[in-house]
């Protein structure tokens, strides 16, 4: 059932509406009261979650007899951004993932944020799907703030992702949807995968399989599931950043998510006018490349890759 | 005056971005003023340019006190300004959300780092800041409360109002906050414009900064007398939100003294022209902020009133 869970008046003849599709199964069982939320579209230039929502909704509605409990799908928390290929909220130049938990007494964006939090709160699990941005391609991964790692990692492992990145807490991230939900007791997992403005269908199917596996583990799904992959957990392993040292266009010579040795060639930054190589980019450590630059033009400082260091790294 | 490049960064398709500082006097690093960090902060740049101009004159007249250095950086992000963008050209990030910066990080982190290294060690720092919100407001000075800077220093600018703000999580990456953490007493100065320049309010800002310099013994000059500054806790500002969306017809201006129950504005239906809402002041006070665009949406902040 489609419901508008938050809305506000725009200047001329229109309201912005945030919608939720609630799918409740007909199977009876212990999980009847359980609820899982799938949330995406906070950033209007991230589209991978669109296909995950669509696939999940399609499979569930064709198999309601195998679903016990409720799955809520929120395909666009920032509908105006989605509609105009704008990362933030168009009217405000504001990153929507910096205004949670919001407040009913606040501005339009803050009031919408508060309504979103209210609607999701109390779910058994919330999955917040992001897809990097147009600059970087990410292997399907779950990002977890270290303060909630113990509680969340077991669920993250069910989601068929390749990698779980446990990162340290930064104060600026306190205003994200995931942080706001986690601190108030609604377990929320942040997925990052693919690249902005695109759909990588294999990643979307991979995560969708993970979502059904999670539902099965929660006792909410009796239909078919696939064998899920065992993710690498960052844990003690260091994450190294590779930033460009020069300007130009970056041309990679490695595949995403491959093993790489320290000093190995990742790609080149070249000057498009002369063809001269401005930088020979190498791996600072041995490990696996989980983030790889997608957008070719780089400045000094542009992120080229993130590498998950191997166990053998000191 | 000594003109120096504080930091520069190469671009693949443009001449290098050179952040330029203008230094006056020699000796102890006394005051640093930073202007436009966003591409739309034309007024902030203009105020700094006028300041450079006045300081050049004062320097010729020998009115800069010995043993002190004043540095002005009118424009950090002219790359964006030159192409009509607000945030960084390439990735749309905000330099004023990247402090203290990181020299091995992303481009805007590197810019923040390079700039910050060049402006550390000053006793006082002033940033010409702009609001996220579109609107007119009374010129004022603001202090991010970190416990480091004395509130009373704000009165030396001689502006009518000074505000103290409790830092929120996202404030911790701003220049003002980090300046204080690294030992500079920092203030943000707001004038009544951003995208356009407003001559009168720019002059008021230039005078305020020069007045501060006089009070701190950095320059000698005669200036119009300032105000007795009222220091206000940001919590004392009453925000008035719109109840519905439409066209906003304001009936008051910034600086107006209003009584509880006075009409602030009417909201007009944008297609049929009817008045669909009237907004009245809930308090006695001074109009400090007024939204200044014709179209407004539900829950827009239309006014901020200093309660009296
Ligand atoms: Zn995102």
Image (tube, rainbow, N blue to C red):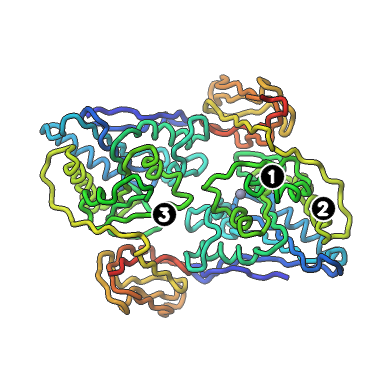
Q: Upstream in the sequence, badge 2 or badge 1?
A: 1
Structural distance between the alpha carbons of marks 2 and 3: 43 Å
Q: Secondary structure at mark 3?
A: loop
**Where is the C terminus of chain A found, in terms of image quarters?**
top right
Q: Secondary structure at mark 1?
A: strand
**Position in image of residue B202 (x %, y %):** 24, 49
Instruction: Give the residue drawn at x 56%, y 26%.
Output: A272
Structural distance between the alpha carbons of marks 2 and 1: 18 Å
Position of B201 with respect to B234 (left or right) is: left
Binning the other alpha carbons within 10 Å of mark 3 as few (below 14), some (14 to 19) or many (20 upward) gives few
**Position in image of residue A136 (x %, y %):** 62, 39
Rendered image quadrant of residue A42: bottom right
The answer to the question of whether label 1 and label 3 lie on touching residues, with beta carbons closer than 8 A, is no
Q: Which residue is mark 2?
A: A213
Number of numbered discs on residues: 3
Q: Vertically, is B122 above or below A144?
A: above
Q: Let me know if residue A145 appears in the view.
A: yes
Position of B5 with respect to A219 (left or right) is: left
Position of A239 with respect to B270 (left or right) is: right
Q: Are marks 2 and 3 on the same chain?
A: no
Q: Which residue is mark 1?
A: A193
Host chain of mark 3: B
Q: Secondary structure at mark 2?
A: helix
- Residue B132: give its label: 3
Binning the other alpha carbons within 10 Å of mark 1 as few (below 14), some (14 to 19) or many (20 upward) gives many
In the image, the residue with mark 3 has its CB under 8 Å from the nearest atom of ligand 1: no
Instruction: Give the residue drawn at x 67%, y 22%.
Output: A262
| In front: label 2 or label 3 | 2
């Amino acid at each position: 059932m489609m419901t508008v869970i938050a809305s506000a008046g725009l200047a001329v003849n229109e309201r912005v509406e945030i919608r939720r599709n609630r799918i409740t199964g007909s199977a009876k069982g212990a999980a009847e009261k359980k609820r899982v939320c799938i949330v995406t579209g906070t950033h209007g230039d991230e589209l991978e979650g669109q296909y995950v929502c669509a696939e999940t909704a399609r499979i569930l509605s064709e198999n309601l007899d195998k679903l016990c409990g409720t799955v809520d799908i929120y395909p666009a928390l920032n509908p105006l951004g989605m509609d105009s290929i704008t990362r933030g909220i168009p009217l405000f130049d504001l990153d929507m993932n910096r205004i949670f938990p919001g407040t009913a007494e606040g501005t339009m964006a803050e009031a919408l944020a508060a309504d979103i939090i209210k609607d999701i709160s109390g779910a058994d699990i919330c999955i917040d799907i992001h897809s990097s941005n147009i600059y970087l391609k990410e292997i399907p991964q779950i990002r977890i703030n270290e303060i909630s790692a113990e509680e969340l990692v077991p669920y993250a492992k069910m989601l068929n992702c390749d990698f779980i990145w446990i990162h340290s807490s930064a104060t600026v991230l306190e205003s994200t949807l995931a942080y706001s939900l986690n601190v108030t007791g609604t377990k929320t997992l942040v997925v990052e995968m693919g690249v902005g403005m695109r759909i990588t269908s294999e990643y979307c199917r991979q995560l969708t399989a993970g979502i059904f596996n999670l539902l099965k583990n929660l006792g909410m799904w009796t239909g078919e599931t696939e064998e899920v992959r065992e993710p690498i957990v960052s844990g003690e392993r260091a994450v190294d950043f590779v930033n460009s040292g020069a300007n130009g266009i970056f041309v990679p010579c490695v595949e995403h998510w491959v093993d790489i040795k320290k000093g190995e060639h990742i790609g080149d930054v070249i000057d498009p006018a002369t063809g001269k190589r401005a930088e020979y980019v190498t791996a600072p450590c041995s490990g696996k490349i989980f983030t790889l630059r997608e957008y070719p033009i780089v400045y000094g400082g542009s992120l080229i890759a993130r590498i998950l260091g191997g166990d053998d790294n000191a | 005056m000594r003109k120096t490049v504080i930091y520069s960064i190469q671009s693949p398709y443009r001449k290098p971005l050179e952040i330029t500082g203008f230094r006056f006097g020699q000796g102890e690093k006394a005051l640093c003023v930073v202007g436009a960090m966003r591409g739309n902060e034309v007024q902030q740049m203009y105020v700094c340019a006028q300041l450079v101009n006045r300081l050049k004159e004062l320097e010729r007249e020998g009115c800069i006190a010995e043993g002190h250095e004043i540095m002005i950086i009118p424009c950090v992000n002219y790359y964006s300004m030159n192409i009509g963008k607000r945030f960084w050209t390439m990735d749309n990030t905000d330099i004023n959300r990247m402090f203290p910066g990181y020299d091995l990080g992303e481009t805007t982190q590197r810019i923040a780092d390079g700039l910050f290294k060049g402006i550390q060690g000053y006793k006082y720092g002033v940033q010409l800041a702009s609001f996220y919100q579109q609107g007119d407001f009374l010129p004022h000075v603001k202090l991010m409360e970190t416990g480091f800077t004395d509130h009373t220093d704000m009165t030396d600018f001689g502006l009518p109002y000074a505000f103290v703000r409790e830092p929120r999580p996202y404030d911790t990456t701003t220049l003002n906050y980090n300046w204080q953490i690294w030992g500079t007493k920092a203030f943000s100065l707001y004038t009544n414009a951003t995208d356009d320049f407003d001559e009168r309010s720019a002059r008021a800002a230039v005078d305020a900064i020069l007045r501060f310099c006089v009070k701190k013994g950095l320059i000698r000059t005669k200036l119009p007398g300032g105000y007795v500054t009222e220091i206000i806790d940001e919590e004392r500002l009453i925000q008035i939100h719109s109840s519905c969306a439409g066209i906003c017809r304001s009936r008051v201006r910034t600086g107006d003294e209003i009584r509880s129950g006075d009409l602030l504005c009417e909201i007009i239906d944008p297609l049929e022209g009817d008045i669909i809402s009237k907004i009245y002041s809930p308090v006695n006070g001074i109009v400090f902020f007024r939204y200044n665009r014709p179209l407004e949406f539900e829950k827009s902040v239309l006014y901020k009133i200093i309660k009296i």
